[in-house]
């Protein structure tokens, strides 16, 4: 008896593995439903990546889903094993089929929130199924369960599985998986769009990257690779219907200059006569201040993305993977604007070289300086020099400038510089922070860094006034996101951790031709900035809904019922009295504006947000 038990267990194990691998054929077949949303490659590397990823990644999912069955096969008698095998396979294939439906609707994969949305969708506003559809679903599931049970029973008692090269097949699947990730590492570093734009369709795929490592080893020059590919076509991927119609923009020499000034990690309550006295004085009675303005993200990536694209964060990875630039940048180039893009920190590190600015041939090098404050100062000097050179040689041409300051993000003040806010910490060390840490010294350090940048921005504004360009320049001053200082005594510091006001509500000031001075009380968003600039600076006459999810900031009645913000993984729908948070794994919760938990219920705003997120996906 004991001598034959290992042999029987081995037979059951091989039968279970055979069952898993045969079901992989059904996985590949169901996964064909993702194909309409695939950017089909037309070059050798892209085709190779598609093949090995299709084989290896879906193979990995099948093997992982089969793992519980293999463990059961070691202890459960063969005559009973067919039942869990059939149930497990039916559940796995059913989930994959449902995921293809969810992906077709929303371009993201099945998660807990989508299940909750379905269960709470009593009126069929999000999902609508007829009685005949339900009958078909029940029939298909029943038939699939019967087939899987029969197949498992046959394979578990078949002696032929002992001769099949099952482990070699499993090894080949894992080899294809490793090849897929190695291919993506190379393609990502080489800005190979035909590879990177494919990744979104694969559920639970987290492709490997190593661009920074390869650069550190001297194996790769990313700037040279990017420059070699900057002339590739920049049309949106076929899976997006964006823009919905060709843009009609007048442009011309009478177009205003545009200057976008961004402070990294600048809070809404850090604008005023104490923290930003120079901006306050320069804009007093002239600029229009938006008092209830929200970034489209609590991180740099999604905050800047929402600012330039006018789109919610769910589109970011698709646009980055396909290296699709912001329409705002493309239209500025088509309107023959001279571009002066300056950033104190690298734009490559957060992917803007392959997204927002993918159409710009050459991005600025990071300024020299040992600290963010020093680099901010150097960036400002470089900007002023650029302006002088432009005025000498190209004065009649309209220009677009971006100044992206980093000192608040780095809690950096210049050595020997003024520090009016005291007591102030010497530096920010997140390891020293806890729920009982006094936030005031760190908040003061942050405000001192903003105070320093305010002096630099004051120089930029004074230069525009001296040159006579002040009245012809549409100026936007804002932040990519805010910053927390344990505001609600929940031990939140920094950013990218929640969607309440400290991390998402930011200053927003507009000044320029056609902008009435004053204060705007309604709720506005970074998603409103790009369409406002497209219409009022570039003369684009398209309805905003053709290319953006935002509204017109110069419409005095603009007041959103809700706005959306994203982090690297999560999404928040922000309403006046509540925030619905959907995390990267699909779990969700509802909190108030101070992060106190509320009853989990899906509000009408959440349903509206889900519909808005679908606007530019091609059916």
Image: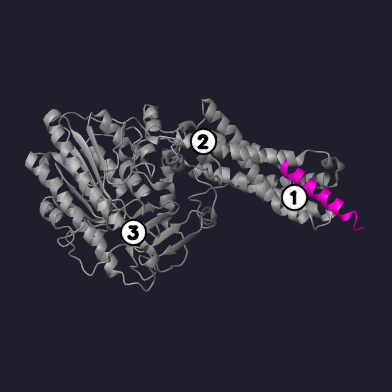
Residue farthest right in this picture: 1
Residue at the spot 71% in from the left edge and 54% down from the top edge: 68
| Dominant SS in magenta | helix
Q: Tell me if mark 3 has few (under 14), some (14-19) or many (20+) residues whose alpha carbon lies within 10 angstroms of its own.
A: many
Residue at the spot 83% in from the left edge and 44% down from the top edge: 154
Q: Which mark is residue 503?
A: 3
Task: Decide if residue 514 is on the left or right side of residue 597.
Answer: left
Task: Decide if residue 78 is on the left or right side of residue 191.
Answer: right
Look at the image and say whether residue 560 sits in the magenta stretch.
no
Q: Secondary structure at mark 2?
A: helix
Answer whether labels 2 and 3 touch (C-beta < 8 Å): no
Look at the image and say whether residue 18 sits in the magenta stretch.
yes
Position of the N terminus by quadrant: bottom right
Q: Secondary structure at mark 1?
A: helix
The tag earlier along the polypeptide, 1 or 3, is 1
Real-space Cα distance between discs 1 and 3? 48 Å
Q: Which mark is residue 37?
A: 2
Q: Secondary structure at mark 3?
A: helix
Residue 28, quarter of the rendered image: top right
Q: Which residues are magenta?
A: 1-22
The tag earlier along the polypeptide, 2 or 1, is 2
Q: Which mark is residue 17?
A: none
Q: Which residue is mark 1?
A: 86
In x, y percent, where is residue 209? 49, 42
Residue 595, quarter of the rendered image: bottom left
Does the rendering let one see residue 618? Answer: no
Real-space Cα distance between discs 2 and 3? 34 Å
Residue farthest bottom in this picture: 436
Q: Tell me if mark 2 has few (under 14), some (14-19) or many (20+) residues whose alpha carbon lies within 10 angstroms of its own.
A: many
């Amino acid at each position: 008896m004991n001598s034959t038990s290992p042999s029987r267990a081995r037979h059951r194990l091989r039968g279970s593995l055979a069952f898993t691998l045969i079901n992989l054929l059904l996985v590949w077949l169901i996964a064909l439903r993702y194909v309409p949303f695939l950017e089909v490659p037309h070059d050798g590397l892209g085709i190779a990546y598609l093949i090995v990823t299709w084989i290896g990644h879906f193979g990995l999912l099948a093997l992982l889903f089969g793992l519980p069955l293999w463990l059961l096969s070691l202890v459960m008698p063969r005559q009973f094993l067919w039942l869990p095998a059939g149930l497990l396979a039916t559940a796995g294939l059913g989930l994959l089929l449902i995921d293809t439906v969810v992906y077709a609707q929303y371009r993201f994969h099945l998660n807990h929130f989508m299940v909750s949305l379905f269960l709470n969708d009593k009126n069929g506003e999000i999902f609508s199924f007829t009685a005949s559809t339900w009958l078909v679903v029940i029939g298909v599931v029943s038939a699939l369960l019967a087939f899987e049970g029969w197949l498992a029973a046959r394979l578990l008692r078949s002696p032929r599985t002992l001769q099949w090269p099952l482990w070699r097949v499993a090894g080949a699947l894992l080899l294809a998986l490793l090849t897929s990730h190695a291919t993506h590492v190379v393609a990502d570093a080489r800005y190979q769009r035909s590879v990177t734009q494919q990744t979104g369709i694969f559920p639970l795929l987290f492709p490997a990257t190593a661009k920074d490592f390869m650069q550190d080893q001297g194996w790769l020059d990313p700037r040279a690779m990017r420059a070699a590919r900057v002339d590739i076509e920049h049309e949106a991927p076929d899976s997006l219907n964006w823009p919905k119609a060709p843009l009609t923009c007048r442009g011309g020499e009478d177009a205003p200059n545009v200057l976008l000034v961004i402070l990294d990690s600048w809070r809404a309550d850090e604008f005023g006569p104490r923290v930003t006295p120079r901006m306050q004085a320069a804009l007093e009675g002239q600029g229009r201040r938006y008092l209830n303005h929200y970034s489209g993200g609590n991180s740099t990536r999604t905050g800047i993305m929402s600012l330039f694209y006018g789109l919610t964060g769910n589109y970011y990875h698709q646009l980055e993977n396909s290296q699709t630039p912001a329409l705002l940048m493309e239209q500025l180039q088509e309107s023959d604007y001279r571009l002066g893009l300056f950033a104190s920190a690298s734009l490559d590190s957060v992917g803007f070289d392959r997204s927002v600015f993918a159409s710009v041939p050459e991005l600025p090098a990071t300024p020299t300086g040992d600290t963010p404050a020093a680099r901010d100062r150097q960036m400002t000097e470089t900007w002023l020099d650029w302006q002088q050179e432009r005025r000498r040689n190209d004065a009649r041409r309209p220009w677009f400038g971006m100044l992206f300051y980093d000192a608040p993000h780095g809690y950096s003040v210049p050595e020997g510089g003024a520090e009016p806010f005291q007591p102030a910490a010497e530096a920010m060390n997140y390891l020293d922070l806890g729920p009982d840490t006094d936030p005031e010294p760190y908040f003061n350090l942050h405000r001192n860094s903003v105070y320093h940048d305010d002096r630099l921005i004051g120089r930029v504004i004074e230069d525009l006034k001296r040159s006579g360009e002040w009245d012809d320049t549409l100026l936007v001053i804002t932040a990519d996101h805010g910053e927390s200082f344990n505001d609600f005594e929940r031990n939140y510091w920094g950013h990218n951790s929640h969607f309440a006001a400290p991390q998402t509500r930011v200053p927003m000031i507009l000044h320029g031709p056609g902008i009435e001075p004053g204060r705007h009380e309604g709720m506005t968003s970074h998603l409103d900035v790009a369409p406002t600039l497209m219409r009022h600076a570039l003369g684009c006459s398209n309805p905003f809904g053709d290319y953006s999810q935002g509204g017109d900031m110069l419409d005095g009645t603009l007041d959103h019922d809700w706005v959306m913000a994203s982090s690297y993984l999560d999404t928040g729908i922000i309403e006046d009295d509540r925030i619905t948070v959907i995390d990267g794994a699909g779990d969700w919760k509802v909190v108030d504006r101070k992060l106190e938990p509320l009853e989990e219920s899906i509000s009408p705003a959440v349903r509206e947000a889900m519909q808005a997120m679908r606007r530019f996906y091609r059916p």
